[in-house]
Image (tube, rainbow, N blue to C red):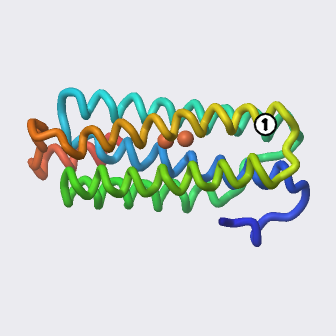
Amino acid sequence: MFQFLMRGDEQINVLRELHAVEVAAEAIYRRQIWRVSGDLKEALVHAAENEKTHKDSLRKRIEELGGKPHFTRYPMYVAGSIMGFVASIFGMWAMMMSNIMFETQAVFDYNGFVRSVKLESESKELLKRFIQDEKDHITAWESFLWEENIELKTSPRIAAKAVAEA
Ligand SMILES: [Fe+2]
Ligand SMILES: [Fe+2]
C-alpha cells in the first residue's frame, strides 16, 4: 500500500507496511467497543487485543532486523479510528461488513506477501499465524452479522465518553 514511500530493505519495508495495517486494525475495533455489549463487546475487545499482539510482534521483528516502524502508522491510526467509529454510528451491519472487508483485504495482502516476497522464515511463520487469526476474526464477524439478539448502545454520552477515553 505504501511501498512507494519506503526505501531500503524490501523485507523490512513489507513488515513496516503490515505493522501500519495492524495499527489501523486495532484502532478500528477499539472505536466500536462503546456501541455494543455482551458477547460482541467481548469479541471486539478480544480482537483488538489480538491485533495489538500482531502489531507488537511486527514491531519487534522490524527492530530485530535493524529497522524502525514507518511514520504511516500515524495516518493509519487516524484512518482506522475514523473507520471504526463511523461504522459504529451506522450500526451492526456497517460494523460487521466493514470489519469483514478489512480483514479479507488483510488476509489477501498477507497471503500475497507470504507467496511473493523473499521473507526469511521467521517472518513468514509470523505472517502465517496472523493469517489464521484474521480468518478467525472474519468467522466471528460473520456469525454476529446474523445474530438477532444484539443490542446496540446509542447514547451520545457513551459515544463521547468512548472517544474521550480512547
Ligand atoms: Fe491482525
Ligand atoms: Fe484481524
How many labels sit on residues?
1
- The quarter of the rendered structure image containing the C terminus is top left
Q: Residues within 10 Å of mark 1 (few under 14, many from 20)?
A: some
Q: Residue at x 40, y 28 (%)?
A: 46
Q: Position of residue 80 (x, y in %)?
A: 45, 56
Q: Position of residue 75 (x, y in %)?
A: 55, 62
Q: Residue at x 35, y 54 (%)?
A: 84
Res. 17 image quadrant: bottom right
Closer to the camera in the image, 152 or 79: 152
Closer to the camera in the image, 158 or 99: 99
Q: Specify whether 11 is left or right of 143.
A: right
Tell whether circle 1 marks a residue whose Cβ is less than 8 angstroms from ligand 1.
Answer: no
- The quarter of the rendered structure image containing the N terminus is bottom right
Q: Could you tell me which secondary element the residue under label 1 belongs to?
A: helix
Name, please, the residue furthest toward the bottom: 4
Q: Residue at x 84, y 50 (%)?
A: 11
Q: Position of residue 77 (x, y in %)?
A: 51, 54
Give the residue type that dot 1 points to: Ser
Q: Residue at x 38, y 60 (%)?
A: 82
Q: Kindly identify which residue carries mark 1.
A: 123
Would you place residue 85 above or below residue 68 in this image? below
Q: Position of residue 34 (x, y in %)?
A: 23, 41
Would you place residue 72 above or below residue 43 in this image? below
Q: Specify whether 166 is left or right of 147.
A: right
Res. 136 image quadrant: top left
Q: Specify whether 11 is left or right of 104.
A: right
